[in-house]
Amino acid sequence: MRISLRRDHPVPLYLQIKAAIREKILSGELPPYYRLPPDRHLAGDLGVNRSTVVNAYRELKAEGLVESHVGRGTTVCAMEYAEDEAWRHSIMPLHWERYLRLGEGERGREITRFFRSVRQEREVIDFSTCYVPEFFENPRLHAYMGTSFFSEMRQEYYAHPCVEGLRSLREAVSEYQKSRGIHAGYDEILITSGSQQAIDMMAKTFVGPGDMVVVEDPTYVIARQTFAAQGARILGIPVEGEGMRLDILEGVLKRYAPKLIYTVPTFHNPTGSCMSRGSRRRLLDLAYRYQVPVLEDDPFYDLRFEGDPVLPLKAMDHMEHVIYVSSLAKSVAPGLRIGWICAPHAIMDRLIHAKKISDLATSGVVQKMMDLLLRGGVYRELLEHMRSKLRIRRDLLVQCLQDSGSDLLELTPPQGGFDLWCSFSGEVHATKLLHRVAEKGVLFTPGEYFTLENRMLSCARFSFSGPREEDIPKGVGILLQALRRYSRDCAFHPRKEREETRPIV
Ligand SMILES: Cc1ncc(COP(=O)(O)O)c(C=O)c1O
């Protein structure tokens, strides 16, 4: 067998022999059942030790390319596939299930489909979307973008930007974050395609199969699914009043060694709750004590329209335990897909690598647009407008619900963000109620969708960002009418007492 070896090469001789034989097998030069020369002979021919050839054959065996039998020596393995053209007559459709990776069954797919079909069928008053559509109607934005955007656009923004993001935007974010009490240099900031990509990069960098990740329960579902997609075991900490139950968190940290705590402390999605300063300190202490990194997801910080701001965990963290993720998706527009991650130097290289293999970089054109918005002060003006809109809508929604429905539901008005969380009284099942009101053109998101184990069946999230002011009273009217009727039906058909279960022994 002709094999040429390079003795001056850093690759060991046994691997060179293995690679040469492997190539001959795969190219068909050595057919199935071909008998390789006995190791002693090949070693003699090549002028190497016998153990070098033995090791090369062992590697080939490990790859399933050859097999050895006493008396028959080492032969090339047979292939599964016929060499003739017979396969052409029996081509089968791909059986996809065989190829798909095992993963979390995608909960939520049903409700997404349901929303889509309702929206296609009729005009809806939509309390399920998280987005202020009027952002785009703002004349100030149009005027600014018309003058500055195109004159600032240079060829370089259309080329591949650096993976970390445009330096000017990273500097602008670094400067902007100071208003949130976060003092981090531009080199601790990485621009991402929305905060969702930042969460995904974190999951891919930190979480592997079987690792534990702590999340609030309920939580932003797609973050939970992102960790689950890496094979994580998810531990949910109940959210009550002003954030996650820290006593339960401590119990979890004591017993398990989670890889990450994921939290949305400011205007939590879906409950709208905001963790107090004291609780944030306590959460940080727990992270320090039990040595767990915290992923703080903060897309709503700029959308406070009432009360005093509470600084992010990142601003209070003096031990570099917090990785901070934020975005302009909620405060400007989700379609722009611009977010960022602010992380300690120690993990920056790993995150940059995760970003590179995910999408190389975020669009340079959109980054420049955001850079102009942040620097020119227009962002702050847009925010003012956005906050006042949100406040008006929140007030209207809360007032309409309380005026006519205080006997049917409980709510705590949030001081910012998009979300109002409601608990219905009695036996009301929010998903069933959704089906009733959807027929009449109103959508909201049932609470169970956000929970780990389909809990909170009689809770719901109402996002007040989407519907226009004139539609809110009408939407609430439809909702309350359906809710009243549903509550009456529940009272007529009280839930059957569950029969006792006796084990069969
Ligand atoms: C809490 C939270 N984090 C992250 C995201 C994703 O935001 P982005 O559009 O910036 O990817 C959302 C979107 O709804 C969210 O609610």
Image: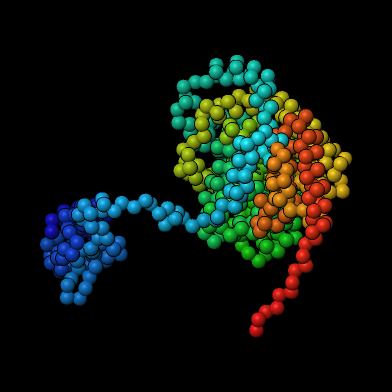
Give left or right: position of 277 versus 152: right
| Whether residue 307 is visible | no
Q: Which percent across, then down, holds residue 53?
A: 21, 65
Residue 299, quarter of the rendered image: top right
Q: Could you tell me which residue is drawn at 46 percent across and 38 percent down?
A: 360
Q: Which percent across, then down, holds residue 332?
A: 65, 31
Give left or right: position of 315 versus 147: right
* In this view, 257 is above or below 428: below
* In this view, 23 is above or below 309: below
| Whether residue 246 is visible | yes
* In this view, 363 is above or below 505: above
Q: Could you tell me which residue is drawn at 70 percent across and 64 percent down?
A: 251
Residue 237, quarter of the rendered image: bottom right
Give left or right: position of 47 versus 98: left
Residue 244, quarter of the rendered image: bottom right
Q: How many marks?
A: 0
Q: Nearer the viewer, residue 359 or 281?
A: 359
Q: How is the image coloured?
A: rainbow
Query: Which image quarter holds the N terminus?
Result: bottom left
Give left or right: position of 161 versus 22: right
Q: Which percent across, then down, holds residue 219?
A: 67, 50
Q: Nearer the viewer, residue 95 or 364?
A: 95
Q: Hey, which residue is sitting farthest bottom in the picture?
A: 505
Query: Which image quarter holds the C terminus?
Result: bottom right
Q: Nearer the viewer, residue 299 or 276?
A: 299
Q: Nearer the viewer, residue 467 or 86?
A: 86
Q: Could you tell me which residue is drawn at 64 percent across and 27 percent down?
A: 374
Q: Which percent across, then down, holds residue 372?
A: 60, 24
Q: Could you tell me which residue is drawn at 24 percent across and 52 percent down?
A: 9
The picture quadrant for ligand 1 comes to top right
